[in-house]
Amino acid sequence: MASSSLVRIAVVGDISENFNPIQILSGDFGEENVPLVQSVAALTFPKAVILGNHDAWFTRDFPRKQKQNGVQMQLDILGDEHVGYQRMDFPSFKLSIVGGRPFSIGGDRLFRKNLLVQRYGVHDMDASAGSICRAAHGTPEDHVAIILAHNGPTGLGSQAEDICGKDWVDEAGDHGDPDLEQAIRQLKETTKLSVPLVVFGHMHKELQRGKGNRKMVVQDGDNQTVYVNGAIVPRVKEAKERGAAESESGGTTRAFTLVEVLDGKIKKIAEIWVHVNGSMAKIVEENTLFEDVTLI
């Protein structure tokens, strides 16, 4: 970073290159899979995390007594790296990660409302949007802001193949989070904050009922913000499933989404598949999803 303004961000994936990226993980580690979250927390490179609906699969309330539960354990393990309704600044990269609503399941209802009320004082969508905006306020003036949420915002399309489209019902529809759309709009209207990237997951790439794949990257109408869905599921496959060469047989291939930010602008987004066999790792497939040709 001393000689370049290029920042690479790995979204919910495994890194095989010899650079120091930021990794952001959009939740759904499992059904309150505490050991996996412990493994994530132990990673030594810069990272930011938000918990998803599966991470609060069983827990409906925080107990008044000191009894632990799966959600509280995950939050304790992650500490400040869990950015739900918080901001995490990375001064060396000149960027800040702003967290959306934890535990989101998509649509117009608050999933695990009791948890949101008890921990964050959030009772409804308006309060949630306000909490996201407050987290963004105070972002250093020389930073760009990246919003990390479990699910994406409303307003990005209502077809089954759209980035937050319902693919499980015939009539389709928009399954985004209205509070996230509201917060992004308020930040653009009331602040000078640059928000070039919104990252989320939840809505799987492979559509149900054999409908193909959904759009995983969308740029808004004014070209100010790129929305990225990192939910490539399953993201770990046997190497032969990805058509690895005979010399690369054995092991697994693992997917992640790589985002390149140059001088505060999104330069490139690619879906990367890495072949991992023992201690060896190699990129075997790269599909460009977005590229700003003016930055090449």
Image (tube, grey):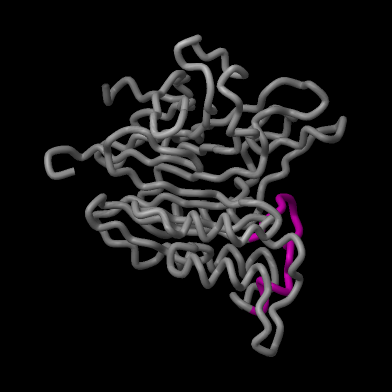
Asked whether, in this view, residue 279 is left or right of residue 31, the answer is left
Residue at 38% over, 62% down: 88
Asked whether, in this view, residue 187 is left or right of residue 172, the answer is left
Residue at 38% over, 41% down: 9
Please state the horizontal and vertical placement of residue 18, each as a whole percent of the image. 27, 35
Please state the horizontal and vertical placement of residue 84, each as a whole percent of the image. 53, 63
Q: Residue 286 sits in which quadrant?
A: top left
The mark total stands at: 0
Q: Main secondary structure of the magenta part?
A: loop
Q: Is residue 197 magenta?
A: no
Is residue 47 positioned above or below 132 on the image?
above
**Region rendered in magenta:** 103-118
Residue at 67% over, 39% down: 203
In the image shown, does 83 or 254 lie closer to the viewer? Answer: 254
Instruction: Find the residue positioned furthest to the top.
Output: 246
Q: Residue 180 sits in which quadrant?
A: bottom right
Quarter of the image that includes the C terminus: top left
Instruction: Find the residue positioned furthest to the right.
Output: 170
Is residue 50 positioned above or below 23 on the image?
below
Asked whether, in this view, residue 245 is left or right of residue 21, the answer is right
Please state the horizontal and vertical placement of residue 22, each as a whole percent of the image. 36, 47
Q: Is residue 104 magenta?
A: yes
Instruction: Find the residue positioned furthest to the bottom.
Output: 65
Quarter of the image that includes the N terminus: top left
Whether residue 279 is visible: yes
Whether residue 134 is visible: no
Please state the horizontal and vertical placement of residue 118, each as a whole percent of the image. 66, 79
